[in-house]
Image: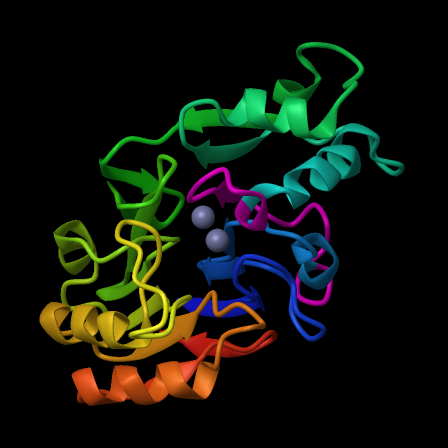
């Protein structure tokens, strides 16, 4: 499995990174996890506009899904070769309506579903191309899913946005790479069921026995080095920061 960080800035884009978006590839299948602000531009550094095979949206906050409106334009009004077949989009209940509302004035009520094949997420396991996938609802103000992606005996877990919760430990259990959000600073922001801080991300990685922890979704106003240090105190394995363009062979 190959993971490419397309964008990793938390909550809003930074000068150097788009918001959440991660490309996962195996056996020629390309799965995109989230498509936040600015992700569609960055994505073109890594794959062609029509080379994705499936899209997973962890939740419907703008920093995880808003570039789907731009991607609708790309697919609906394709200039060369006609409109592609609808691409599977796995998202929470209401994803289609959310994108219609965010885009505004679509050519018809059905336009969004003419380019996106919407599947409503629930907690559970299913196959997606070559991947065995498990999703769990996590703890965030809107319905939000974390995802565990397995292929060839290797495992990637992506937290999406979440506060500390048991379901995340299960999702990350034994993961070779745990891509975990760390938006908050320990002792500074203390709001339950919203985001993790560096210490909590480290504690989750330790309890799950993850092989490697990559911290992501750190907002530009947050001290990333502090969060890495806090995670390292709670977790013995390797900890690093996600960076745009970073590639991991899992
Ligand atoms: Zn977010
Ligand atoms: Zn969110």
**Image location (x, y in percent) of residue 94:** 47, 22
The N terminus: image quadrant: bottom left
* Magenta stretch contains residue 45: yes
Residue at left 77%, top 19%? 106
Question: 223 and 26: which one is in front?
Answer: 223
Q: Residue visible at 68% across and 10% down?
A: 109
The C terminus: image quadrant? bottom left
For residue 79, say whether it is visible: yes
Name the chief secondary structure element in magenta: loop
Closest to the observer, 26 or 105? 105
Residue 247 screen position, x and y as percent: 51, 77
In x, y percent, where is residue 46? 66, 66
Q: How many marks?
A: 0
Give the quarter of the image for residue 173: bottom left
Residue 114 lies, with reference to residue 133, above or below; the image says: above
106 vs 177: above or below: above
Colouring of the image: rainbow
Left or right: residue 242 versus residue 39 is: left
Q: Is residue 110 above or below residue 139?
A: above
Identified at 22% across, 79% down, the residue is 211
Q: Is residue 235 visible?
A: no
Q: Residue 178 occupies which quadrant of the picture?
A: bottom left
Q: Which residues are magenta?
A: 44-64
Residue that protrudes farthest toward the top in the picture: 109
Residue 15 within the magenta-colored segment of the rendering: no
Image: 208 above or below 234: above
Q: Residue furthest right?
A: 79
**Where residue 163 sits: x, y (%)?**
28, 55
């Amino acid at each position: 499995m190959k993971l490419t960080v397309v964008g990793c800035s938390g909550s809003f884009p930074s000068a150097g990174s788009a918001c959440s978006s991660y490309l996962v590839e195996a056996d020629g299948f390309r799965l995109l996890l989230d498509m936040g602000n600015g992700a569609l531009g960055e994505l073109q550094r890594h794959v062609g506009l029509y080379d994705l095979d499936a899209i997973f949206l962890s939740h419907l906050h703008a920093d995880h899904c808003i570039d789907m409106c731009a991607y609708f334009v790309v697919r609906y009004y394709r200039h060369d070769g006609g409109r592609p077949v609808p691409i599977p989009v796995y998202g929470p209940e209401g994803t289609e309506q959310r994108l219609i509302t965010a885009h505004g004035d679509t050519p018809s009520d059905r336009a969004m579903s003419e380019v996106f094949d919407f599947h409503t997420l629930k907690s559970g396991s299913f196959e997606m191309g070559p991947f065995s996938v498990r999703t769990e609802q996590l703890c965030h103000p809107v319905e939000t899913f974390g995802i565990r992606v397995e292929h060839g005996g290797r495992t990637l877990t992506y937290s999406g946005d979440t506060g500390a919760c048991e379901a995340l430990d299960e999702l990350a259990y034994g993961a070779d790479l745990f891509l975990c959000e760390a938006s908050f600073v320990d002792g500074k922001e203390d709001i339950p069921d919203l985001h993790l801080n560096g210490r909590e991300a480290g504690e989750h990685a330790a309890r799950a026995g993850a092989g490697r922890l990559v911290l992501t979704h750190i907002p530009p106003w947050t001290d990333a080095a502090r969060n890495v240090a806090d995670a390292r105190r709670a977790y013995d394995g390797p900890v690093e920061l996600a960076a745009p363009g970073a590639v991991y062979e899992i």
